[in-house]
Amino acid sequence: MLQSTLFSKTRKEAPSDEVSKNAQLLVRGGFIHKEIAGVYTYLPLGLRVLNKIENIIREEMNVIGGQEVFMTTLQDPEIWKKSDRWDDEKIDNWFKTKLKNENELGIANTHEEPLAKLLTDHVNSYKDLPLYVYQIQTKFRNELRAKSGLMRGREFLMKDLYSFSRTEEEHKEFYEKAAETYKKIFDRVGLGDKTYRTFASGGSFSKFSDEFQTLSRAGEDTIYIDEKKGVAVNKEVFTDDVLAELGLEKAKLVEKKAIEVGNIFPLGTKYSEAQGLLFRGEDGKDKPVVMGSYGIGLGRVMGTVAEVLSDDKGLIWPLSIAPFKVHLIGLSDASDLYNKLKEAGVEVLYDDRDLQAGQKFADADLIGVPYRVVVSERNAGSGKFEFTNRATGETKEITEDELLKM
Ligand code: ATP
Ligand code: MG
C-alpha cells in the first residue's frame, strides 16, 4: 500500500481525553478513531490488525472442531427470562431497546441463552453430540467505566464458543483442550510469555472458571503467579483452600497486575435446563446438555498487545498480527523495490510521501511495522538496503534477494 493514499494521519500528541496507553498509541498511529468513550472505529491499519487476530482465532477454533455461526445482536427477552438473566439486577450492563409496538429487545452482551435455544431445534439424541459452536460477533455492554481504550469497550468484538457435551467427563475433556488452544492463540498473537492460565471465580455461571491473564501494569486484575508452573490464581479466589486444591505454595507466588484477555467457563446444565435443551441418551432417557463457554475479546487482545509490546516511540507489532510486514521508507524513489515486494507477496507499506526523513522515521516507529527498509540516494545503485528490526532495534544491510526471500 502507498502511504500517500492512506487517509488516516498520524498525530504527534495523544488526544487529551485518552488516558490509556493503548488508545493513545493506536489513535496517534491512525489505527482507531474514538466515537465516544468505549466506542471505537477501526481505520484501515487497525482493521488489518483486527482481521489477523480474527483469522488466528478462527483457525484455532476450527482445529478443535468449532463450527462457525453468526448470531443476531437483537435478542428476545423471553429467552433470557427463562434463565432469570433479563433483569438489570442480574446483568447490570445490558443495553436494551424497544420495537415500535413497545415490546422490549435485548442488545447482545453474550449469547448463552440464544444459542442453547437455537440448538433445541437441532439436537435430539446422544448421536448429535458433542457439538462446538462459535462466532466472532459484536457484543454491547454498558460498562460503568470505559477509560481503558480497546481493552474495555462498550461495543466490542468477541469470539465466543459454546460447547455442548453429553456428560461432565466429555465436557471436561474439551474444556482442557480449549484451554490448550487458548495458550496457542495467545502464543500466536505474541502474548504467550506474558499470559497465564488463571484460576478465577465463575461469576454467574459456576463456582470456578479459568481466565487467561496477560501481565501488565495497566491491568485491572490482581493475580498471583507461579512462574515455574506457568499458572496463576486471581485475587478474588485467593484463599488457602484454593491454593491447596491447586497444589500451589503461597510463598512461591508473586503478586502482579494483569489484563484478562480470555475466559473459559464450565456452565453445567444451567442454560440447557432453562431452554429445554435435552438429548435422548443411549438408555432412552432425556438429559440436559452439559455446556461450557469460551470467550476472547479481539479488541482487548489488540489493546493488550499495544499496551505490553510498545516503547516510548510507538507500537511494536508481532509479525503474526502486524498490519504490514515491511515498512519501505523511500528517501528517494523506491517504487522498483516496492513493486518487487508486492509481486513476491510481501505485505508492504511504502512511505512515498513528500516528507522529511525524520518525519518518516518517527511515523514508522509509531506505526510499528516489524521490518523497516530504507531506500535512499546513497544505497540506490548498490542493491543493498538498510534494514531495521522494530522490536530489537537491530540494523543491518540487506540485499534485494534476501529481502524478497524473507
Ligand atoms: P471483565 O471481567 O474484564 O469485565 P468479563 O469477565 O465480563 O470481562 P466475559 O464475559 O468472560 O468477560 O467475556 C469474554 C472475553 O471478552 C473477556 O475475557 C475479554 O477478553 C472480552 N471482554 C469482556 N468485556 C470486554 C469489554 N468491555 N471490552 C473488550 N473486551 C471485553
Ligand atoms: Mg472476567
Image: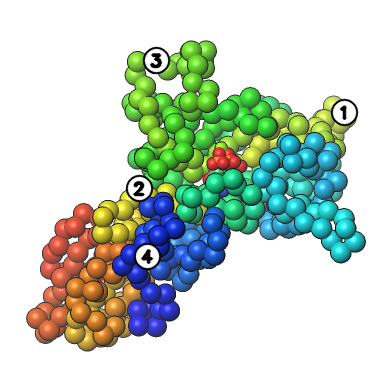
* Residue 217 in picture, x, y percent from top left: 36, 40
Whole-number angstrom distance, CA of label 2 to CA of label 1: 52 Å
Q: Quadrant of the N terminus?
A: bottom left
Whole-number angstrom distance, CA of label 1 to CA of label 3: 45 Å
Helix, strand or loop for disc 1: loop
What crowding class fits label 4: few (fewer than 14 Cα within 10 Å), some (14-19), or many (20 or more)? Answer: many
User: Residue, x 64% and y 53% (percent of image)?
Assistant: 140
Whole-number angstrom distance, CA of label 4 to CA of label 3: 44 Å
Of 105 and 18, which appears nearest the observer?
18
Q: Is residue 357 visible?
A: yes
Which residue sits furthest front?
16
Q: Earlier in the sequence, mark 2 or mark 1?
A: 1
Q: Quickly name the residue at label 1.
A: 285
User: Residue, x 73% and y 36% (percent of image)?
Assistant: 90
Q: Earlier in the sequence, mark 2 or mark 4?
A: 4
What crowding class fits label 2: few (fewer than 14 Cα within 10 Å), some (14-19), or many (20 or more)? Answer: many
Q: Earlier in the sequence, mark 4 or mark 3?
A: 4
Whole-number angstrom distance, CA of label 2 to CA of label 4: 17 Å
Q: Amino acid at mark 3?
A: Glu
Q: Quickly name the residue at label 2.
A: 308
Q: Quickly name the residue at label 3.
A: 249
Residue 313, above or below 362 = above
Q: Amino acid at mark 1?
A: Lys
Q: Quadrant of the C terminus?
A: bottom left
Q: Quickly name the residue at label 4.
A: 28
